[in-house]
């Protein structure tokens, strides 16, 4: 049984890398200066950081159900099952949307996992899952490893807490 992976852009892994590893990527939305952008597709990280340095105050929102459905349907043409690994449900409604979309698209073929992480933590979990699947690991072994990694800690620092407080 082939198992495919899906994540969201909060993993901060480049779309090129994820494409090379055949990992589906669902974009979150970034509202910036009165416009709504798909993260990484319509707004690059560099452009976002430049806008923030200039005083812009971005607000994020989870992907739409249709965004998940599109990625799920495309990947289910290639894989028997999908493991959909996303940003912490305590930080975003992304996992909730992923579960809703999975129920609509193929509830018995898509397993949604709340990483409990964001950014580099989520990215590391995705890369570990890729590594395990390349090594022939079964779905349950990958999920057990992801559950173990959820107990990890991620430390980071920011220049300004106001962006974190808003989002």
Image (cartoon, helix red, strand yellow):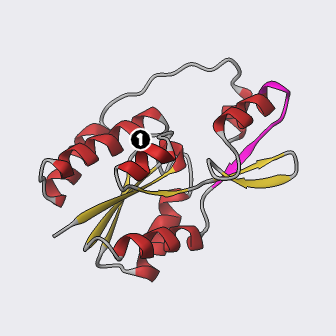
Percent x, y of residue 89? 48, 52
Q: Is residue 120 left or right of residue 81?
A: right
Q: Is disc 1 placed on a helix, strand or loop?
A: helix
Dot 1, crowdedness within 10 Å: few (<14), some or many (≥20)? many
In the depicted view, which residue is nearer to us: 153 or 55? 55
Q: Is residue 128 left or right of residue 15?
A: left
Residue named by callout 1: 122
The residue at the point 51 percent across, 73 percent down is 70
In the depicted view, which residue is nearer to us: 72 or 94? 72
**The N terminus - image quarter:** bottom left
The residue at the point 27 percent across, 41 percent down is 128
Task: Inspect this view and state whether residue 95 appears.
Answer: yes
Q: Is residue 80 magenta?
A: no
Above or below, comparing residue 38 to residue 162 in the picture: below
Percent x, y of residue 108? 29, 79
Above or below, comparing residue 68 to residue 126 in the picture: below
Q: Is residue 55 magenta?
A: yes
The residue at the point 19 percent across, 49 percent down is 134
Q: Is residue 133 left or right of residue 35?
A: left
Please state the total of marks drawn on the protein image: 1
Q: Is residue 162 left or right of residue 88?
A: right
Task: Inspect this view and state whether residue 144 appears.
Answer: no
In the depicted view, which residue is nearer to us: 63 or 4? 4
Question: In terms of image quadrants, where is residue 27?
Answer: bottom right
The residue at the point 73 percent across, 36 percent down is 47
Q: Which residues are magenta?
A: 53-61
Percent x, y of residue 160? 71, 21
Percent x, y of residue 81? 27, 70
**The C terminus - image quarter:** top right
């Amino acid at each position: 049984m082939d198992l495919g992976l899906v994540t969201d852009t909060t993993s901060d892994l480049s779309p090129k890398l994820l494409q090379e590893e055949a990992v589906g990527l669902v974009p979150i939305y970034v509202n910036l200066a009165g416009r709504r952008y798909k993260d990484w597709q319509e707004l690059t990280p560099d452009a976002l950081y430049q806008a923030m340095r200039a005083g812009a105050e971005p607000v994020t929102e989870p992907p739409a159900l249709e965004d998940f459905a599109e990625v799920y349907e495309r990947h289910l043409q290639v894989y028997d099952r999908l493991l959909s690994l996303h940003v912490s449900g305590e930080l975003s409604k992304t996992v909730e949307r992923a579960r809703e979309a999975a129920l609509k698209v193929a509830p018995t073929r898509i397993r949604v996992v709340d990483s409990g992480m964001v950014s580099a933590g989520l990215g590391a979990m995705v890369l570990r899952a890729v590594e395990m699947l390349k090594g022939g690991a079964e779905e349950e072994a990958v999920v057990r490893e992801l559950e173990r990694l959820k107990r990890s800690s991620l430390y980071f620092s920011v220049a300004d807490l106001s962006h974190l407080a808003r989002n």
